Amino acid sequence: MIFEKLNIIPPILEALKREGYTQPTPIQEQAIPVILAKRDLVGLAQTGTGKTAAFAIPILQILQAEPKEVKGKHTIKALILTPTRELAIQIGESFTAYGRYLGLRNTVIFGGVSQGAQTDALKAGVDILIATPGRLLDLMNQKYINLRHIKLFVLDEADRMLDMGFSHDVKKIIAHLPEIRQTMLFSATMPPEISKLVGDILKNPIRVAVTPISSTVDAIEQTVYFVEKKDKKHLLVHLLKNKAVISALVFTRTKHGADKLTRDLIRAGVQAEAIHGNKSQTARQRALTKFKNKETRVLVATDIAARGIDIDELSHVINYDLPNVPETYVHRIGRTGRAGLGGEALSFCDQEEKAYLLDIQKLITKPIQVIEDHPYPLSEDSEIASQNIPPKAGPRKTGVIGYYRRGRQR
Ligand code: AMP
């Protein structure tokens, strides 16, 4: 399949070529024709599947065919609602990239920064608005934003949105949208609350689904190291001596844990930075940019801060702490192995986290390979390494971690 087959207009095809995209991903192949046919859509897809382009490309194409101005002014015709500032910024960058040869304007609004630059952009007129719920409501209340010209509405990461407590805000925003509109809802999982929302806000939607949450991306190699809690930082420093770890996103359970680990890494001579909700938006964005540019090798993050972080060619995801919600593991490791690239997901498991590991293995329905040969094994009496863990897949590994890549060139 090539993009040309999806009836995409030449200026967008040209922009995709510039991005280095040669083939649509499965979610793009399924969703683009549905959205271009102006149908409502439910997309069951997690980040890393190319879902942003799956909605951004057809939205740009539909809007390109519409008059941009009403009474000489650009009006907001598409609204993309997304849970985090990082995601909002990345979606904005995607619209800018795919729409670079069109005359459409997008702007991104989110909280945690002063509103001046955002309201200036709104006053100048925009066609596509990408927003997090809180700031959007705030600016709507201040009358900077009017949603009455919206024709296209995307609710992105709907499950996460509800997890983060935005349910009420989302409903308030939807109440301001015109009845006649095209709605697209994307979610990695489909819990009952989301199914209900789909019934409430979409009309005869077409469903498209890729990579169910339980089947982790095959391109990702998953391993686990049993280690005492106190030795985790030493094990991490040891593993980071391997040059094959080009860039690693390391997950800790708490913000405090992220800061502490970052300090330990810096002390050990590793370029590391932390990203979490207590940092200012500017600090988070700066950390992310440095990581993307490979100036920082290790980004230590909490789940909320890292949700949807889109980093090309991320070689390793390291679960320094295992998550107690197994789906979170799938979301975390989905940061690597993106769009055809291989990647590695390493997990540290201490005594107390053993139950979490079993839950994760149940969800992903395959064993995670145990690396026994490392300098900080659990002591004999903690004896968790061999208990209750499903059989190892393939030959025993030696603890050497390598980065492999496939496909895409940029
Ligand atoms: P997303 O799931 O939207 O977060 O996208 C994941 C990553 O895949 C992003 O870095 C995109 O730039 C990239 N991507 C999206 N579509 C394609 C494609 N058709 N070919 C190659 N890379 C893509």
Image (cartoon, grey):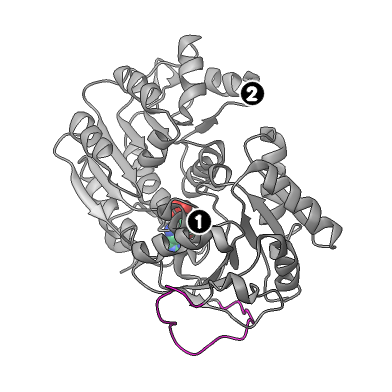
Q: Residue furthest bottom?
A: 395
Indicate the quadrant containing the N terminus: top left, top right, bottom left or bottom right.
bottom left
Q: For this rendering, which residue is in front, 97 or 174? A: 174
Vertical order, 147 against 60 (above or below): above
Q: Residue at x 59, y 81 (%)?
A: 372
Q: Residue furthest top?
A: 142
Q: Residue at x 53, y 59 (%)?
A: 353
What stretch of residues is rendered in magenta? 386-404
Q: Position of residue 60 (x, y in %)?
A: 38, 42
Q: Residue furthest front?
A: 381
Q: Position of residue 352 (x, y in %)?
A: 55, 58
Q: Is residue 265 left or right of residue 393?
A: right
Main secondary structure type of the part rendered in magenta:
loop
**Image mark for residue 223:** none
Question: Of discs 2 and 1, which sits in the foreground?
Answer: 1
Residue 109 occupies quadrant? top right
Q: Which residue is mark 1?
A: 332
Is 403 covered by the magenta stretch?
Answer: yes
Q: Position of residue 3 (x, y in %)?
A: 35, 62
Vertical order, 286 against 12 (above or below): above
Q: Residue furthest left?
A: 204
Amino acid residing under circle 1:
Arg
Q: Residue at x 30, y 18 (%)?
A: 175
Q: Position of residue 277 (x, y in %)?
A: 62, 36
**Image mark for residue 117:** 2
Residue 210 occupies quadrant? bottom left
Q: For this rendering, which residue is in front, 300 or 141? A: 300
Vertical order, 113 against 209 (above or below): above
Check disc 1: other Cα within 10 Å, few if <14, some if 14-19, many if 20+.
many
Q: CA distance from mark 2 to mark 1?
A: 32 Å
Q: Is there CB contact under 8 Å for labels 2 and 1?
A: no
Q: Residue at x 18, y 46 (%)?
A: 206
